[in-house]
Amino acid sequence: MPWPGLLGLAILLAWLLAAAIGPALLGQDGADMGNGDVFATMSAHHWLGTDYLGRDMLARVIQGARYTVGIALLATLMASSTGTLLALLAAASPPWVDAVLSRGIDTLTSIPSKMLALIMVAAFGSTLPMLIPTAALIYVPGAFRIARSLAVNINAMDYVTVARTRGEGRLYIMLHEILPNIINPMLADLGLRFVYVVLLLASLSFLGLGVQPPDADWGSLVRENIGALANGSAAIIAPALAIASLTIAVNLLIDNLPGRAARGDH
């Protein structure tokens, strides 16, 4: 893997570790009131300064990583797995099943993602159990369309025809003949979809419709500390850079995967 890919992998692993064990290692709760001044500058005591309530921003950013990375990862896995399974079913089923599934997915695609998210949040609330399926539902159509285009091509191959001829069932065709041949491009698509979900959740939180206080993800940290924008405090720069670093790291990793690099050289 080229060095940009390794850099992206290192940053991504760092944020995953921060989300998993960061708050425990810090030994402090970012939701507690701090002793620092409001929007204090970076110092030895507060490496990233303090927020609008005097709380340590390093603790808040690491605590926010748990929500940003965790929710985005779960929603992305749900979206990609659901879209892929529906695509396998569409490819291995009679044409009318493919038509029904495709038209239903097209209906979701016709609704702008932000509008659909606002409708879902307004109808069911912005609790964590609701944010995950909402973000997943929005990105199922994209995963379905890519997986279906791959699965339809694989379904027309001779070895799939041979499997049908010897009496293999639809489930066997889906899981043993088609899925192994589309798994690599779908893993690459999963990384891109993860970036989309992170940006969507950050947008919702910035509008006050995402993770609710006292919990906070990076988008809500930007919204909470918008008052520090005038003096360029780290309280607003730190969560914004965290969002940028995560999305850039995933893109670097995807663009430099060994399989993609080999295909590009060829």
Image (tube, grey):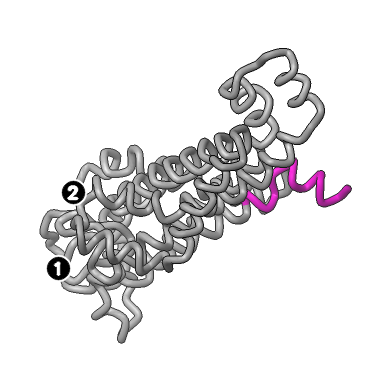
* Label 1 residue SS: loop
Residue located at (25% from left, 73% from top): 225
Reply yes or no: does residue 240 show up in magenta: no
Depicted 89 relative to depicted 9: above or below: above
**Secondary structure found at label 2:** loop
- In the image, taking residue 21 as reference, residue 172 lies left or right, namely right
Residues drawn in magenta: 253-266
Residue 110 spot, x, y in % from top left: 47, 65
| Mark 2 Cα-neighbour bin, 10 Å: few <14, some 14–19, many ≥20 | some
Q: What is the C-alpha distance between the residues marked 1 and 2?
A: 14 Å
Question: Which disc, if any, is residue 23?
Answer: none
Nearer-the-camera pick, 32 or 87:
87
Pointer 1 or 2: first along the chain: 2
**At which x and y percent is residue 73?**
42, 44
Residue under label 2, please give it.
29
Q: Dominant secondary structure of the magenta stretch?
A: helix
Quadrant assignment, res 52: bottom left
What is the quadrant of the N terminus in the image? top right
**In the rendered image, is residue 77 in sight?**
yes
- Please name the residue shown 61% across and 44% down the image: 147
Q: Nearer the viewer, residue 160 or 73?
A: 160
Relative placement, left or right, of 266 versus 192 is right
The amino acid type of the residue labelled 2 equals Asp
Give the residue type at disc 1: Leu
Density class for disc 1 (Cα within 10 Å; few <14, some 14-19, many ≥20) is some
Taking the image as shown, residue 123 lies to the left or right of residue 231, namely: left
Residue 48 makes an appearance in the image? no
How far across and down, in percent of the image, does residue 88 sit?
Answer: 58, 35
Considering every residue shown, the one lying at the far bottom of the view is: 230
Q: Which mark is residue 53?
A: 1
